[in-house]
Image (cartoon, rainbow, N blue to C red):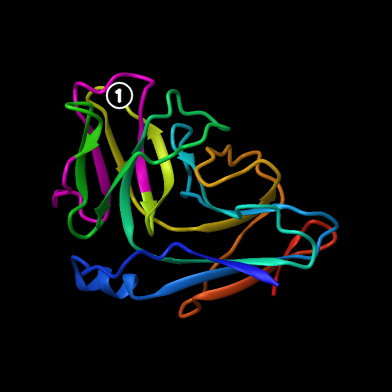
Amino acid sequence: MGIHISYRGPEKKAATPAAAAAAGTTYSLTLKNQSAQAWIFYVYQQMPAQSNDLFSLAWFASPFMITVGNRITFEWDIVYNFVWGATGTVRPGVTFNASGEIDGDPSGANTTTFSATPGPNLSAAVKAPPSGSLVINDADDVPNNTFSVGIGMSGTGTYVVQAGPNLKHQFTPTPSYWIAAGTDVKVGTVLDIQTVTRTIEAKFPVNVFAQTWTLNESNTWVNG
């Protein structure tokens, strides 16, 4: 037996033909537990040469321990969004609960402004250079060490950075999907990707949109 979690949002008209093609493709990961104990299974994304001030979030996480012999399936679409949260200082172990989000499109409306007035908010995204990136500009009223901003996929946060007055944050989406097993992780947990164990990158070859991975008795992930 297993459970199924979908991170697919309602159907929306994409801003560009390329975005429409991506949005129309559903990806899925099924994670099986054939190890010796129960685990929280989770998925996160990682940028190439990720900087120290950019934090990956637990993007998906099983809502309870996946016991031996059971599985969980996650589904998503490649549709991007901007997010903000009232996290205080961003550091590993903190939980990011998105307090607001708006749609974003690297090839279309790709730039927004985060402001603290009249309350924390993201402005409607507009198209601005550079194309292919997602950009957040922090207004001058944003206090230090109070809020975090970032991007997400399929409606859930994937990366966050510390917000502050007059900062500019530029993200170039290059999705890479990593699966892991832990004991104290939930959606939005800020990760230290250098210390994550029982993890492996789940690469999707061209025209492959569904994969199954099994955590075996050696606590090693194997494809299939």
Q: Main secondary structure of the magenta part?
A: loop
Q: Is residue 200 above or below residue 162?
A: below
- Against 146, is 218 above or below? below
Q: Which residue is mark 1?
A: 164
Q: Nearer the viewer, residue 187 or 203?
A: 187
Image x and y of residue 118, in percent: 17, 27
Q: Nearer the viewer, residue 20 or 174?
A: 20
Q: Residue at x 80, y 62 (%)?
A: 68
For the N terminus, give its image quadrant: bottom right
Q: Residues within 10 Å of mark 1 (few under 14, many from 20)?
A: many
Closer to the camera in the image, 215 or 73: 73
Furthest residue toward bottom = 207
Q: Secondary structure at mark 1?
A: loop
82 vs 161, left or right, is left
Locate residue 32 relative to residue 25 in the image: left or right.
right
- Range of the magenta residues? 123-151
Tell me the residue at 27%/48% (across/down): 134
Task: Tell me: 214 left or right of 208.
Answer: right
Locate residue 20, reporting x and y percent: 26, 72
The location of residue 74, given as percent across then percent down, is 54, 65
Q: Is residue 11 magenta?
A: no
Residue 146 painted magenta: yes
Q: Is residue 171 above or below residue 115?
A: below
Dot 1 amino acid type? Gly
15 is higher (above) or lower (below) than 149: below
Q: Is residue 193 left or right of residue 114?
A: right
Residue in view at x 69 percent, y 75 percent = 224
Q: Residue at x 58, y 32 (%)?
A: 93
- Rendering coords of residue 28 (x, y %): 52, 70
Total marks placed: 1
